[in-house]
Image (cartoon, helix red, strand yellow):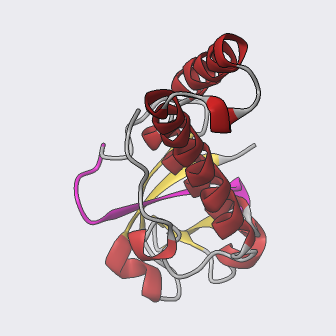
Amino acid sequence: MTMKVFVRTGDLSTDEPVVIATYSDESHVADSAHGDGMSVLTLPPDAVAMHDGMPHLRKDWRDRAGPMPVAAEAKRRVEREFPVDKQIDALRELIALILANGTESAKWPEGIRARMAEIDEQFRFIDEIKQRAKDHPVAPLDPGSDKLWPRRAART
C-alpha cells in the first residue's frame, strides 16, 4: 500500500518535514490540489509519523521509501506528457504507417518519415524518464524537481 503525500517543497531540506495532507494512492487527487510550492510524494505509510500532534515525514523517510518516490514521479510525468491512451493511439498509427508503407522507412515519403520521427521522440521521452528514475535509487531532496528530469517532449 502507498499513499500520496503533500509536503511544502522548502521543508524537504529539514529533518522531519511537516506533512500537509495524505491520501490513499488510489484516490484521484490532483497534484495541484494544495497549491504552489508543494511536492507530491508517493510513500509507504510508515514513512509518516505523528510528532507534536502533526504528521511529519520520518527522518529516514527516503530509506523507508527506497526508489518508490522517484518511480512514482516518473510515472506522473509520463502520464502527464504522454498518457497511456495517447501511447496506444501512437502505436496504432505506427502500425498503420508500417502496414501501408512497408518496413523500409528509408523508402517512405518525407512526410511519413517526419511523423514517424515525432512518434519516436515521444517514446524516447518515456525511455529517458525511466532511465532517470533508475539513476536515483534513493529519493533526492525533491523528487519532483524539474531539474532532475529530462525536458518534456513535444505533444503529438
Q: Vertical placement of 43 versus 96: above or below?
A: below
* Residue 117, position as x, y percentages in the image: 53, 42
The magenta stretch is 33-47
Foreground residue among 124 and 62: 124
Exactly how many numbered labels are in the figure?
0
Residue extending furthest left?
A: 36
Point out the image quarter for the C terminus. Answer: top left
User: In the rendered image, which quarter is residue 135 located in?
Assistant: bottom right
Residue 2 appears in the rendering = yes
Q: Residue 61's spot in the image, x, y percent?
A: 66, 74
Above or below, 151 against 5 in this view is below
Which quadrant is home to the N terminus?
Answer: top right
- x 51%, y 28%: residue: 109
Q: Quadrant of residue 36?
A: bottom left
Snapshot quadrant of residue 60: bottom right
Q: Nearer the viewer, residue 129 or 138?
A: 129
Q: Is residue 69 visible?
A: no
Q: Is residue 2 left or right of residue 21?
A: right
Q: Is residue 63 left or right of residue 107?
A: right
Horizontal side of 68 relative to 114 (left or right) equals: right
Residue at screen point 64% across, 75% down: 139
> Residue 14: x and y, percent?
45, 88
Q: Residue at x 61, y 31 (%)?
A: 26
Q: Position of residue 154 (x, y in %)?
A: 38, 46
Would residue 126 be counted in the magenta stretch? no
Q: Is residue 43 above or below residue 98?
A: below
Q: Nearer the viewer, residue 71 or 131?
A: 131
